Image (cartoon, rainbow, N blue to C red):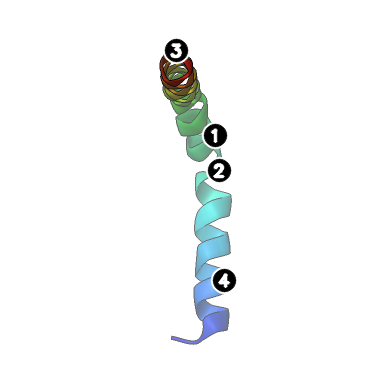
Amino acid sequence: MKKEDILVFSLGWLAANTPQLVQLLNALLPVIVVVVLGYAIHLIGQDKGKKK
């Protein structure tokens, strides 16, 4: 396959599946936010523990 064929196939797949991808990202967003906040709280807790 040529690079152009792969690009055309990828863009076609993306165009056909955009609604499902948006729905998936909307479902995963709260999980990602909780993970990032949990990690930030973990790092803040470590920093305070080292300063004592």
**Three-letter code for the amino acid on which mark 4 is drawn:** Val
Q: Looking at the picture, how far across and down is residue 29, in whole percent?
A: 50, 25
Residue at 43% x, 86% y is 1
Q: Quadrant of the C terminus?
A: top left
Contact, mark 1 vs mark 2 (Cβ under 8 Å):
yes
Residue at image mark 2: 18
Q: For residue 42, which quarter of the picture?
A: top left
Q: Which of marks 3 and 2 is nearer the N terminus?
A: 2
Q: Considering the numbered disc 1 on the image, is that residue within a helix, a strand or a loop?
A: helix
Q: Which residue, as the protein is rendered here, is positioned at the far bottom?
A: 2
Q: In terms of depth relative to the viewer, which is nearer, 13 or 42?
A: 42
**Three-letter code for the amino acid on which mark 1 is drawn:** Val
* Disc nearest the viewer among 4 and 3: 3
Q: How far apart are marks 3 and 2 (CA)?
A: 50 Å
Q: Considering the numbered disc 4 on the image, is that residue within a helix, a strand or a loop?
A: helix
Q: How far apart are marks 1 and 4 (CA)?
A: 21 Å
Residue at image mark 1: 22
Contact, mark 4 vs mark 3 (Cβ under 8 Å):
no
Q: In terms of depth relative to the viewer, which is nearer, 25 or 23?
A: 25
Q: Which of marks 4 and 3 is nearer the N terminus?
A: 4
**Three-letter code for the amino acid on which mark 3 is drawn:** Lys
Graded by Cα atoms within 10 Å as few (under 14), some (14 to 19) or many (20 or more), the crowding at tag 2 reads few
Residue at 41% x, 15% y is 49
* Disc nearest the viewer among 3 and 1: 3
Q: Earlier in the sequence, mark 4 or mark 2?
A: 4
Q: Is 35 on the left-hand or right-hand side of 22? A: left
Residue at image mark 4: 8
Q: Which of marks 1 and 4 is nearer the N terminus?
A: 4
Residue at image mark 3: 52
Graded by Cα atoms within 10 Å as few (under 14), some (14 to 19) or many (20 or more), the crowding at tag 1 reads few
